Image: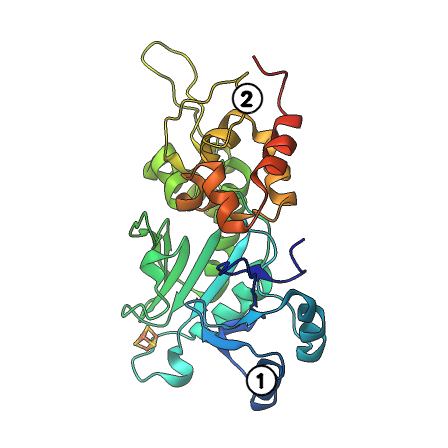
Amino acid sequence: MLPKGANLQKIRDGKRTYAITPHLPGGFIKPEVMQKYVDVTKKYGGTMKLTSAQRIMITGLAAEDIENIWEELGMQPALGYANCVRSVKICPGTAFCKRGKQDSIKLGLELDKRYIKKEMPSRIKMGVSGCPNSCGETYVKDVGVIGTDQGWDVYVGGSAGSHPRLADKLIEGLNYEDTLRIIDIIMTYYQKHADIERVGQFIERIGLDKFKNDVLAVFYGEKSAAEEPKVPQSEAGEKIVPLPGGLTEGNLVFGDAITADSVISDIIRVYPQTIPVFRSFGMGCLGCPSSAGEPVTKAAEIHGLNITELLVALNKVVPANK
Ligand code: SF4
């Protein structure tokens, strides 16, 4: 069983070690909190590692120590569900940077307060940059903003990693309140209409014009324009079910048994009722493009799971196999 608030790290010689990552909004840390990191890392033989989300992970920990470590730190885990708002990266902005055009810290911390750990169709990363230099990596975040002399420009659909995508500009020159308002509209729209797909994948599927028109219609008070995104149709006219992650055509069809070679994105496309089963095994990475494209046996190996037990549990929730 996965210790609460911890991630399994690489298994070496059958030995499992875990990592924890406390929530650290904006990457700001007081000396006394930093001291606690140092104390627990020394005491429990861990290693500290800075993460790309402006946090400090402590890795190399034993399962039985995790509960005590959280208690001694007195902090909360950064991550809730796999498919949630996972991070808000914030640059120093006008508070600390000579190039800053807008107060990225104020806006970023507000976004962190409103959205962090909020459950979403897939993982969401946000970036807040005080000027077009984009030190908050706005252009590769699902939702992000860039400060200019005119206000905030809002971007959507960026992603780094194995399937990189540059974000599209949605609107420019907004004030603080309108920026928060349009981000709220974006998040609500995405939550309501997206499949298990990142914002960029969702935009690719329904089209940028449709996404933009619907979100801006709500923003400008023309609510009636925001109709349901259309499910794509094939030439023959049958409904095409969107592929979670958009990665594989897959061979699995309804009625097939799930086998060790079945690809995760196929399984959750054909049998979405398996999602809670994956999650109950600690496999929360269903919205991640690389893990969703793996055979279930590979994912089980990475997570240190017994493949037989996992397959039994998965096949329990699918209809009678052919
Ligand atoms: S994005 Fe601009 S304001 Fe923010 S740290 Fe970079 S240079 Fe400074």
Please, which colouring scheme is shown? rainbow
Q: x, y (%) of residue 18?
A: 57, 64
The residue nearer to you, when weighing 168 against 212, is 168
Residue 42 disc label = 1
- Mark 2 surroundings: few (<14), some (14-19) or many (≥20) residues within 10 A: some
Q: Quadrant of ligand 1?
A: bottom left
Residue visible at 64% across and 56% down in the picture: 2
> Disc 2 or 1, which lies upstream in sequence?
1
Determine whether, in the image, residue 271 is placed left or right of residue 127. right
Question: Eyeballing the image, is 175 above or below 202?
Answer: below
Query: The residue tagged with tag 2: helix, strand or loop?
Result: loop
Question: Eyeballing the image, is 203 above or below 248?
Answer: below
Q: Amino acid at mark 2?
A: Ala
Where residue 235 sits, quadrant-wise, is: top left
Q: Which residue is mark 2?
A: 257
Query: The residue tagged with tag 1: helix, strand or loop?
Result: helix
Determine whether, in the image, residue 277 is placed left or right of residue 145. right
Q: Would residue 79 be seen by someone viewing this image from the given angle?
A: yes
